Image (cartoon, rainbow, N blue to C red):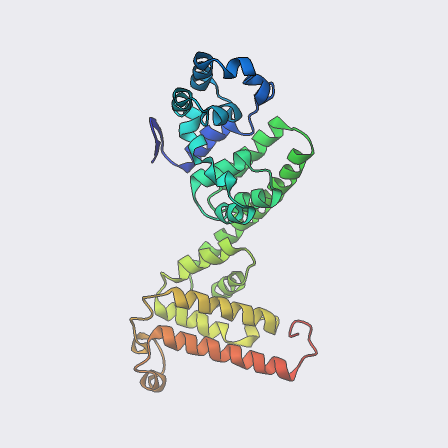
Amino acid sequence: MIKLGKYAYKDFLEYYTDVMNRYFRRMPPIPTNIYLSQDVAKNRNIKKKIASHCHFPSIINVLANDEDEEVRLEARKNEYWHLVGRFQDILGFARNERMAFARIEGFHNLVVLLIFEDDLQILREVLNNPAISLKMLVHFIRLLRERGNGRKDEQIMEIASEVMGQKRKQIVQISQINRAAKQLNLDQNLKTILHYLRDENNTVRLAIHNILLKEDPNRLNRLIHMAINQAHFQDKLNHFVTLTELIRLIDKSEKLKKVTVQSLNLPEEIKYGERNRSIKDYFNLLIRSKRIEIIRSIEDDLSEIENI
């Protein structure tokens, strides 16, 4: 539930859809400085009426910062101000800060950036944000197409279409991951998990992290022993990247830190030799040792381009 003053939405999708329909790139029919001409600027009552009834963001933004306190207060009662306007501080931040906010799943920031941001790279980051679902992206494209206003919109449309293709691909990938995760006792499914563990899409990798962190340590043990076997990888680079991602995964697990190797299905001599080691440390030892082995083998053979 999202509550903003007297407004309530059951979820981010409902809020997003309503606010985007109301305010997405919405401009007054005449420039703001003409809309708020000198005659209007001198008349408190007219400004208060505009502040109360106008739905154009640029107009309310000006009146919400008017020197007249009564006008300011009236503008800040406007539904636009409640739903979007009061969250606009982000637009005054430096580009690198806005870029950082675009990657965070804060629904107010994402909507503000989608409505007002002109920087194409920042918009790409917002649209790529996992919080922006495919349904939201389709709605964004529809609104953009309806507005259709010059080269800038064409560029935004190109980015949005590209991101939509990526998100559709991502949905297929995550579906395959979820199917594989249901039967991790099968080698083919373990190979699928390892394949996507080195995917360039961070959302795909995080989906695997979320699944594996809930898995039984013995299933992780099978996965890791498969991962340290070079035969399951096309080249050393892919092998090394996969092992690195596994280290990131293992480092996240507090559960594995609290359980010893004794609980794993391993030969007794290994369990005895590692009896005081946690599963987390044991897995890390296996993976890091293999990575060192790969690095040493690369030092001996610099002929393959992926090794270099």
Query: Residue at (51%, 48%) from the top-left corner?
Result: 97
Nearer the observer, 117 or 75: 75
Q: Position of residue 299 (x, y in %)?
A: 62, 82
> Would residue 64 be visible to someone looking at this image?
yes
From the viewer's perspective, is 160 left or right of 276? right
Residue 227, relative to residue 156: is it above or below? below
From the viewer's perspective, is 56 left or right of 151? left
From the viewer's perspective, is 29 left or right of 207? right
Query: Residue at (42%, 33%) from the top-left corner?
Result: 86
Instruction: Check the picture and name the quadrant holding the C terminus.
Output: bottom right
Nearer the observer, 63 or 20: 63
How many marks the image carries: the answer is: 0
Query: Residue at (65%, 40%) from the top-left corner?
Result: 158
Query: Residue at (44%, 46%) from the top-left corner?
Result: 105
Residue 9, relative to residue 94: is it above or below? above
Q: Position of residue 31 (x, y in %)?
A: 60, 21
The picture quadrant where one finds residue 261 is bottom left
Q: Position of residue 302 (x, y in %)?
A: 68, 79
> Would residue 186 be visible to someone looking at this image?
no
Residue 154, relative to residue 199: is it above or below? above
Instruction: Check the picture and name the quadrant holding the N terminus.
Output: top left
Residue 271, relative to residue 101: is it above or below? below
Q: Position of residue 225 (x, y in %)?
A: 45, 75
Nearer the observer, 230 or 207: 207
